[in-house]
Amino acid sequence: MRMEKITELHEILASSNRIVFFTGAGISVPSGIPDFRSQDGLYTNDIKAETIISHSYFTHDPKGFYDFYKAKMCFPDAQANSAHKWIAKLEKEGKSLGVVTQNIDGLHQKAGSEKVDEIHGSIYRNHCMDCHTFYPLEMILESPDIPRCPKCGGIIKPDVILYEEPLDEKVVYKAIDKITKADTMIIIGTSLMVYPAASYIQYFNGDHLILINKGKANIQISNALIFDEDVIKVVKELEGHAL
């Protein structure tokens, strides 16, 4: 039964030309980036992580926000793993429309993917809230306290969508457009708990829906090929499958 599912996935990939990948935190866990929802570090000083990375908390206590953000959400030394590279390879082969990701770690780009819609933003983009000057991640990490703009003194904010903040409409439009046009959608490393991003699968009208995630999804997905296991194992077996 196990190899039958791998064979089925292999055949789906071979017949697909408009694959869209939808990825969450689980794809980056093998790269050493923790999924904060399932870690002991979910609470800091008895405050939920969801509270600390909210817009109101950032406004009220930017130092507390940055202490948590730099320690728990920024991993500049993390490297793309075999799953990220597999996705990039399919894009280069012309099989994929690209990636829609909930992740902010930039690992899809490190792997070589170019068509990436980051619906929750990226740690690698930061702007002064006053003069809008761009700053790289290093500016955030090297600041001993609250990162401030050398030009005007304004607080530098990461281009990461915090709780209570709306998603970027342009990014959302591009993501939904990819999903709508896809013939195959592969969901990797997400239990589909984060909304509105998780609701985007309703726009998929293609032929094949695949879920690769260790643990059950938060919603029922009918007619999907489901792998309840680590994506690295699936990719390894898939790449070893006889062509």
Image: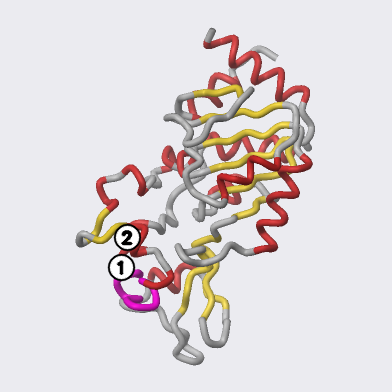
SS at circle 2: helix
Asked whether residue 226 is drawn in magenta, I would say no
* Mark pair 1, 2: CA separation: 6 Å
State the residue in front, 225 or 84: 225
Magenta highlight: main SS:
helix
Q: How is the image coloured?
A: secondary structure
Residue at 37% x, 58% y is 50
Read off the residue under disc 1: 67
Residue 160 picture location, percent across and down: 50, 64
Instruction: Name the image quarter holding residue 8.
Output: top right
Query: Total of numbered circles in the picture?
Result: 2
Residue 93 picture location, percent across and down: 76, 35
Q: Which segment did they paint magenta?
A: 57-67
Quarter in which the C terminus is drawn: top right
State the residue in front, 25 or 203: 203
State the residue in front, 206 or 154: 206
Instruction: Name the image quarter holding residue 45.
Output: bottom left
Residue at 53% x, 87% y is 130
What amino acid does circle 2 point to?
Answer: Ala
Residue extending farthest to the top is 1
Q: Is residue 30 above or below residue 230?
A: below
What amino acid does circle 1 point to?
Answer: Asp
Read off the residue under disc 2: 71
Q: Which mark is residue 224?
A: none
Asked whether the beta carbons under mark 1 and mark 2 sit within 8 Å of each other, the answer is yes
Quarter in which the N terminus is drawn: top right
Residue 167 picture location, percent across and down: 58, 62
